[in-house]
Image (tube, grey):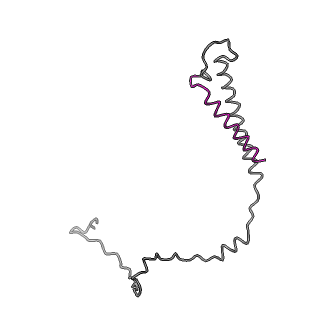
C-alpha cells in the first residue's frame, strides 16, 4: 500500500511542477496569445491553471499527511536481535597495526617515561605585575 501511495504522490508532484511551469509570471497563462474565439482564451487558460495549481497543491499536502500517518501506523515495534547483541559484545576491539615502514629500524628502542613538569611562575617586572607572554 505504501508503494501505491508513493507512486500517486510522485504523479501529483510531477503534475504540480508541470502546471506551475506552464503559467506565465504575468498571469498570461500558457503563453497563448491570439484570437479570443478559440476554445480557451488566454484568460480562461490562466484561470484553469490557477485552479489546477491550487487543487494539485491541496492534493499534494493531503497525500503527504496520509503517507506520514500510514508510515507511523505500519512501523513495527522495536525488536532487539539478541544474537546480534551477543556477537557485538563478544567482539573485542583491537589496536590498529603499525604501518610497515614504521617498524623498520626501530628494533630494540625503548621510550623512557617523561615526568610532568610544574608550570613555571610568571616573570615579574619591577612593579610586581606579571608580564604577558
Q: Looking at the image, which is closer to me, 1 or 124?
A: 1
Please tell me whether residue 75 is drawn above or below residue 115 in the rendered image.
above
Please tell me whether residue 107 is drawn above or below residue 127 in the rendered image.
below
**As drawn, which residue projects farthest toward the right?**
1
Q: Quadrant of the C terminus?
A: bottom left
Q: Quadrant of residue 51?
A: top right
Q: Quadrant of residue 24?
A: top right
Residue 83 location, x and y as percent?
Answer: 73, 72
Q: Quadrant of residue 112?
A: bottom left
**As drawn, which residue projects farthest toward the left?**
126
Please tell me whether residue 38 is drawn above or below residue 119 in the rendered image.
above
The residue drawn where x is 68% and y is 23% is 48
Q: Which residues are magenta?
A: 1-26
Q: Looking at the image, which is closer to me, 85 or 19?
A: 19
Per the picture, the main secondary structure of the magenta-coloured stretch is: helix
Residue 14 location, x and y as percent?
Answer: 66, 37
Residue 37 part of the magenta segment: no
The residue drawn where x is 56% and y is 22% is 26
Residue 1 location, x and y as percent?
Answer: 79, 47
Residue 61 location, x and y as percent?
Answer: 69, 38
The residue drawn where x is 62% and y is 23% is 30
Please tell me whether residue 22 is drawn above or below residue 4 in the rendered image.
above
Left or right position of 49 against 123: right
Amino acid at each position: 500500500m505504501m508503494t501505491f501511495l508513493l507512486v500517486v504522490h510522485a504523479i501529483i508532484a510531477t503534475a504540480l511542477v508541470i502546471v506551475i511551469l506552464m503559467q506565465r509570471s504575468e498571469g498570461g497563462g500558457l503563453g497563448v496569445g491570439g484570437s479570443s474565439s478559440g476554445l480557451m482564451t488566454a484568460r480562461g487558460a490562466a484561470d484553469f491553471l490557477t485552479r489546477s495549481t491550487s487543487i494539485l497543491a491541496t492534493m499534494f499536502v493531503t497525500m503527504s499527511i496520509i503517507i506520514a500517518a500510514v508510515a507511523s501506523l505500519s512501523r513495527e515495534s522495536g525488536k532487539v536481535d539478541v544474537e546480534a547483541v551477543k556477537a557485538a559484545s563478544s567482539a573485542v576491539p583491537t589496536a590498529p597495526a603499525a604501518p610497515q615502514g614504521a617498524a623498520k629500524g626501530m628494533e630494540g628502542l625503548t621510550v623512557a617515561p617523561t615526568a610532568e613538569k610544574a608550570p613555571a611562575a610568571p616573570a615579574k617586572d619591577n612593579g610586581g605585575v606579571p608580564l604577558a607572554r
